[in-house]
Image (cartoon, rainbow, N blue to C red):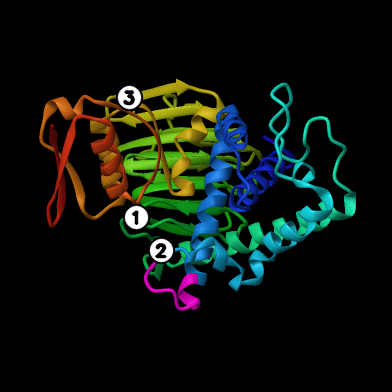
Amino acid sequence: MSTDQTNEIEEIASHWLIRRQSGHWAESDQVRFEQWLDASTLNRVAYLRLELAWEESARLKALAAGIPGDQLPPPGRWNLTPFFDAHRALSQSRATLGTNDLPGTLASDSEPCDPHLESGDAPAPDNVYRAFARRTNRLVLAASVVLAIVAGFAAYKFSGGGGDRYATPVGGLSSVPMRDGSKITLNTNSHVRVALTNTERRVDLNQGEAFFDVAKDSNRPFVVDAGKKRVVAVGTKFSVRRDGDSIEVVVTEGKVRVEDATRPLRHAAVEGFESTIAEGAESAVFLTPGAIAHVDQSGVLVLRKSVSEAETHLSWRAGVLMFRDESLADAVVEFNRYNVRKIVIGDPAVAALRVEGNFRATNADAFVRLLESGFPVRASAEEDRILLRSR
């Protein structure tokens, strides 16, 4: 997907966010909003990312305003910060434009769900729309910066052993910029070592999961060592998740190669990706966008998916877990990666239940409450665990 398309999705998502918080939200808005979310996984991920940023910025403002606890301020008090002046400007312009002329109103069922225009109405005056868009973009940018600052505290860095080391605690999520222009996003309970030389860029993934947005440099391959395997790229986007000697690789852009890490990496004189090979690497596997590879000592299993389907596996970058007809046993395994207090299933019948939905990764309590309300499940909260049994 191009940068322009990504920016367009994020802009529409920001208008949806503003519209939902404006206090003027009808059932028809909800229907069309859900249609827009369902139209693409990228739509859903973009909206969830902005929503998380909004909530984090509101929580920080609540603390600064003297509101006790980690609670969102009530909507009426969000104007305590200039970031929320867009809502005030929106209310003032409503008297001039009329509700149906505002950005955020949905199109008809036969049109794409772009909230910029109301079907059958003329566009809002350019000066009003531009003023609103500028305020919205500043709000989204500010919220994103706040989220980046909050996420930054989830990682810690220490030097030694021939490179910089970065780690996140359980439930942590952090972005790590590299000097070559690449970026690493670390998931929960992850640990990497980063070393840059004149001939290569090397990351040792000691545990956990990371997403790599790799700056193109054909003279220095980007190498991720994960146990007995390594993943090699030049300029691409992919993730690696390590569980002991087993890894999962998800590619969303470009091409990567998975090969045996026990063989030495040889750099040929010819420039280009194909010139950097492992000696005797006839068993190397090449992965293209949409590929999801599961690699262990028994071999490599590659699933060919669409890029949007592959993106679903990476929803953790927005702090969200997406389950699509997953067994509850598998869903619990995922939740336990992000939470210190673990969920324990004490009944095979409970483990076999199927779940679907989007959930905040670090909010296991909310997930358990939903299980109790929608399934024949009874939860018992204990000091270090939550036990699930049939009801």
Which of pointers 1 and 2 lies earlier in the amino acid sequence? 2
Disc number lying in front (3 or 2): 2
Q: CA distance from mark 1 to mark 3?
A: 31 Å
The reply, left or right, for residue 314 in relation to residue 221 is: left
Task: Answer few, some or many: residues within 10 Å of disc 1's Cα (few below 14, many 20 plus, some between 14 and 19).
Answer: many
Please name the residue shown 71% across and 28% down the image.
Answer: 112
Q: CA distance from mark 1 to mark 2?
A: 8 Å
Q: Nearer the viewer, residue 117 or 336?
A: 117
Where's residue 53, x and y in %?
Answer: 54, 57
The reply, left or right, for residue 81 in relation to residue 343 is: right
Please name the residue shown 62% across and 37% down the image.
Answer: 29
Residue underneath mark 1: 171
Which of pointers 1 and 3 lies earlier in the amino acid sequence? 1
Residue underneath mark 2: 154
Where's residue 387, x and y in %?
Answer: 14, 43
Q: Are marks 1 and 2 in contact (CB under 8 Å)?
A: yes
Q: Amino acid at mark 3?
A: Gly
Residue underneath mark 3: 299
The reply, left or right, for residue 336 in relation to residue 8 is: left
Is residue 85 on the magenta stretch? Answer: no
Q: Which span of residues is magenta-colored?
A: 62-70
Can you say whether 199 is above or below 250 in the image? below
Q: Amino acid at mark 1?
A: Gly
